[in-house]
C-alpha cells in the first residue's frame, strides 16, 4: 500500500467510525432522517431562533430539522495559517465536533447538518492579500456585495475550484456533517464545473445544497440535493407564484434524498404572521421540504435571525398524498394528523369544509369549517394532532 492509499484508507475508516448508519450506508442514514421526520419542518440558515432566551441554544437549534452553517459552528477549526488555504481541520477539534453532532441528534434524531463551503466571497483575512485566487477587476479585488465587507473569489480558476472541492471533501470526511452548502448559486459554466468537482469530491452519498434564490438551475440540477431558496422578493402575487413554481420544479428535478429549503423575509416585522403561515403552508403543500421565515438581509443585525413560532411545532405527521389545487385557487394537502392549506396572494378568502372537526393553528378555532385569507395559510389538526 502506498502512502497515499494508506492516508485515504485511514480517512475512510475515520469517516465510517464517526458517521451513524442504517444499513451500512451514509446515504441510507441521511435518507432515513429526511424521510422519517414529521411536519411542519423548519431549517436554520446560519443564524438562530433568538426569541427563546431561557432555552439552551443546543435545544433551540435541535428544534430545526436541517441546519447549515460555517464549519466553526459545529466545533471544527481549519488547520492552517490562512483559513482559506486550509484543506483539513485541526485534529483536536474533530472529536468535540462529533460530540456536538451526537448531542444534536439525541435531541432530534432526524436533524440534517451541512457546512457552508465558501467559494464566491470571504473576509479579507481569508487569503493572503496578494493571492491570485482573489477576483480582480482592473487590478483591484472586487467587493462581495453592496452592504457587505467581504471580497470576491475567482471561482473561474480551475485550480481554485479543485481547492474548494477538497475543502468540501474534508468537511464530509470528518463525520460531523451530512454534506455541504454552496451560496450565491447560478447555472453558468464556472458553477457547473464547480458542482461537478464538489460532487466528485464528496461522493454520491453526501448532500449538496445550493442557494439558487427563486431561480431554477437545469444544468447543475443533477448534482444538487436541494435548493436554499433565499427568496428576496415576496411583495407581489407574481413573486409568490414564481416562488411556488421554482419550489415545485426543484421537488421534481433535484436528486434524492431531496432537501429543498424555502425562506421568505418579513415585510414590516416578525409579527407578519400571515406571511410566516403562508411560507409554511406553501412549503407543506408544494414540497416535502423545509421552511423558514426570517429577518430581511438589509437589516444591520446578522442575516437570517428569526423567531420560533408555535405554528411550527410538530403535529401533522407525514404526508398522505401530494398537495392539490382546489377549485377556489387554494392548495390543500392531507397529512397523517390533519391538513395544510395555502391561499396565495391575489386570491380571495377561501372557506374549506371538511368531514371532521379540526383545530386551526392560525385561529384556535375547532370545527369542520375554516376560512383562510389571501396570502395566508393554516394547519388544521385532528384532536390527536398535538404530538409528532
Image (spheres, rainbow, N blue to C red):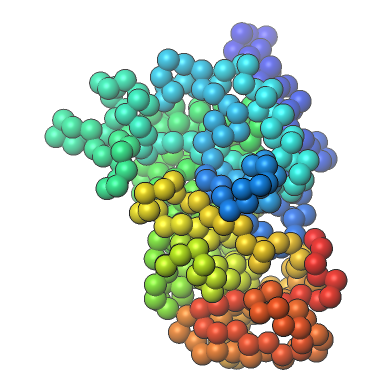
- Which x, y percent locates residue 236? 39, 76
Image quadrant assignment for residue 136: top left
Residue found at the far left of this picture: 138
Numbered circles on residues, count:
0
Q: Looking at the figure, which quarter contains the N terminus? A: top right
Give the answer, above or below, for where 233 lies relative to 164.
below
Q: Is residue 9 left or right of residue 190?
A: right
Q: Quadrant of residue 176?
A: top right
- Relative side of 317 to 45, left or right: right
Residue 34 visible in the current orientation? yes
Residue at the far right in the pictured view = 384
Residue 256 screen position, x and y as percent = 64, 52
- Of 182 and 91, the residue lying toward us: 91
Residue 155 seen in the figure:
no
Give the residue drawn at x 50%, y 51%. 305
Residue at x-position 65% and y-position 28%:
97
Q: Residue at x 57, y 17 (%)?
A: 90
Of residues 169 and 211, the one nearer the viewer is 211
> Of all residues shown, which one is farthest toward the front?
54
Quadrant of the image containing the C terminus:
bottom right
Q: Residue at x 48, y 36 (%)?
A: 117
Is 233 displayed left or right of 142 in the figure?
right
**Whole-percent x and y of residue 220?**
47, 50
| Quadrant of the image occupied by residue 41 | bottom right
Q: Can you give x and y, in whole percent of width and height, for residue 273 in the image?
A: 55, 70
Q: Nearer the viewer, residue 310 or 380?
A: 310
Does residue 68 lie above or below 79 as drawn?
Answer: below
Amino acid at each position: 500500500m502506498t502512502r497515499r492509499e494508506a492516508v485515504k484508507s485511514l480517512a475512510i475508516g475515520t469517516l465510517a467510525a464517526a458517521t451513524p448508519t442504517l444499513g451500512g450506508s451514509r446515504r441510507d442514514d441521511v435518507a432515513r432522517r429526511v424521510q422519517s421526520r414529521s411536519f411542519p419542518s423548519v431549517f436554520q440558515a446560519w443564524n438562530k431562533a433568538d426569541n427563546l432566551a431561557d432555552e439552551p441554544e443546543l435545544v433551540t437549534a435541535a428544534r430545526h430539522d436541517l441546519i447549515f452553517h460555517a464549519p466553526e459552528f459545529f466545533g471544527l477549526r481549519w488547520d492552517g495559517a490562512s483559513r482559506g488555504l486550509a484543506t483539513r481541520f485541526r485534529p483536536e477539534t474533530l472529536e468535540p465536533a462529533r460530540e456536538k453532532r451526537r448531542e444534536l441528534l439525541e435531541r432530534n434524531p432526524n436533524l440534517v447538518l451541512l457546512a457552508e463551503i465558501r467559494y464566491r466571497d470571504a473576509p479579507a483575512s481569508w487569503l493572503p492579500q496578494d493571492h491570485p485566487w482573489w477576483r480582480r477587476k482592473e487590478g483591484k479585488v472586487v467587493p462581495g456585495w453592496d452592504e457587505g465587507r467581504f471580497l470576491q473569489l475567482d471561482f473561474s480558476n480551475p485550480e481554485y475550484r479543485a481547492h474548494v472541492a477538497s475543502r468540501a471533501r474534508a468537511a464530509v470526511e470528518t463525520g460531523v456533517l451530512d454534506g455541504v452548502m454552496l451560496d450565491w448559486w447560478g447555472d453558468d459554466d464556472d458553477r457547473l464545473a464547480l458542482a461537478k468537482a464538489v460532487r466528485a469530491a464528496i461522493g454520491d452519498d453526501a448532500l449538496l445544497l445550493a442557494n439558487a434564490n427563486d431561480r431554477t438551475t437545469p444544468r447543475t440540477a443533477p448534482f444538487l440535493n436541494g435548493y436554499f431558496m433565499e427568496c428576496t422578493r415576496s411583495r407581489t402575487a407574481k413573486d409568490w407564484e414564481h416562488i411556488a413554481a421554482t419550489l415545485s420544479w426543484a421537488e421534481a428535478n433535484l436528486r434524492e434524498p431531496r432537501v429543498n429549503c424555502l425562506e421568505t423575509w418579513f415585510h414590516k416585522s416578525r409579527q407578519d404572521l400571515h406571511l410566516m403561515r403562508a411560507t409554511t403552508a406553501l412549503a407543506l403543500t408544494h414540497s416535502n421540504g423545509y421552511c423558514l421565515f426570517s429577518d430581511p438581509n438589509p437589516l444591520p443585525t446578522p442575516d437570517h435571525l428569526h423567531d420560533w413560532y408555535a405554528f411550527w411545532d410538530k403535529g401533522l405527521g407525514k404526508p398522505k398524498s401530494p398537495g392539490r389545487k382546489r377549485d377556489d385557487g387554494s392548495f390543500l394537502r392531507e397529512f397523517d394528523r390533519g391538513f395544510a392549506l395555502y391561499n396565495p396572494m391575489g386570491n380571495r378568502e377561501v372557506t374549506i369544509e371538511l368531514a371532521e372537526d379540526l383545530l386551526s393553528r392560525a385561529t384556535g378555532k375547532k370545527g369542520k369549517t375554516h376560512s383562510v385569507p389571501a396570502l395566508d395559510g393554516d394547519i388544521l389538526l385532528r384532536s390527536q394532532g398535538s404530538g409528532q
